[in-house]
Image (spheres, rainbow, N blue to C red):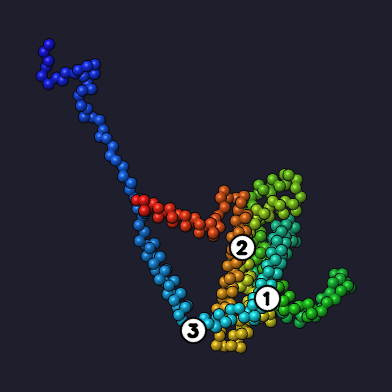
Amino acid sequence: MSQSPGTAVSSGSAPLAETIPRTDLPAPPKTLTAQRVLPLRRPGRHLVTAVVLVLVAQITHGLVTNPFYQWDRFQYWFLRPTILDGLLITLEVAVYSAVLGLLGGILLALARLSPSPVLRAVSWVYTWLFRSVPLIVVLLFLYNFSALYQTLSVGVPFGPAFFTFDESRLATDMAVAVIGLSLNEAAYASEVVRGGILSVDQGQHEAASALGLPKRYQFARIVFPQALRSITPNYVNQLIGLIKGTSLVFYVSLLDLFGSVQSMGSTYPGDIVPLLLVATVWYLILTSVVSVIQFYVERHYSRGALRTLPPTPLQKVRNGLREMRARVRRETAI
């Protein structure tokens, strides 16, 4: 049997087409090699970071090496009994005023949201008045209050008095400072509390009313805990301002932290700068403690609103170290 030229003869049972090489098949895949993903270059960010670091280094160097700050005298005054006594008075005034101011702010906020037009008007006028008058004016007015009213009495309105008090004996320096700061703080706290209550969804009020719960129970157990998520950061700002505002009680003859520094500065005029640095550092410590408390309070009231709670500072440090070790392993493996 004759075969045509160029025709391949197959042996066995294999088809003839399998013996012809295929040219339309894809090429075998190449071996994949690990490639490093380079991050996007951001020269502007690095430049700004370098400038900021240089400025911080210059400021730190100036604070440490400038003899005008007298850090040896700062160390001498920092824990002196006079300074610590003034610090204790500052803490007492701040705590009393914060508690009384918050309670007064809650009452004023409820009065502002009340259906009674008289309560709404009184609350609005009180808030408008004390937000308009400077705090130093309020303190000085209370300090000289005995010049207007020598005695205070309790009895029937426009009638006989049952009890009479000497105002000069009741109005001590501590009482004047606490009352003045509390009155001023209540005006600002009322707006903070009112804003927090209004931030609660209206459906929560309707659901509580539909369950037939008393108004007091609705506010204490349903509305106010949810409002605290909005109230806490705003009121902490007020509290930090209150701590710094206690420095004004020096003008009503109460030697708080700032008053003690001023008194020692007049006695030792060469130590004015280190004494001011002592007051600055103590105020920084107080406000930092308040900020830490604010973080944990916000974290507590975020449990029902966030799926994952924000990490604590210790958890942030651990996560940062874990990510750093993982990055080092990836770079060494490549």
Amino acid beneath label 1: Ile
Amino acid beneath label 3: Phe
Residue tagged by mark 3? 68
Estimate how packed mark 1 is, as few (under 14), some (14 to 19) or many (20 or more) residues with alpha carbons within 10 Å.
Answer: some
Where disc 3 sits, the SS reads: helix
Seen at 46% across and 81% down, the residue is 66
Amino acid beneath label 2: Ile
Image mark for residue 137? none
Q: Looking at the image, is mark 3 or mark 2 earlier in the sequence? A: 3
Q: Looking at the image, is mark 2 or mark 1 earlier in the sequence? A: 1
Classify residue 301 by image quadrant: bottom right
Estimate how packed mark 2 is, as few (under 14), some (14 to 19) or many (20 or more) residues with alpha carbons within 10 Å.
Answer: few
Give the percent coordinates (x, y) of residue 190.
Answer: 67, 63
Front residue of this view, candidates 115 and 256: 256
Mark 2 to mark 1 CA distance (whole Å):
21 Å
Front residue of this view, candidates 142 and 278: 278
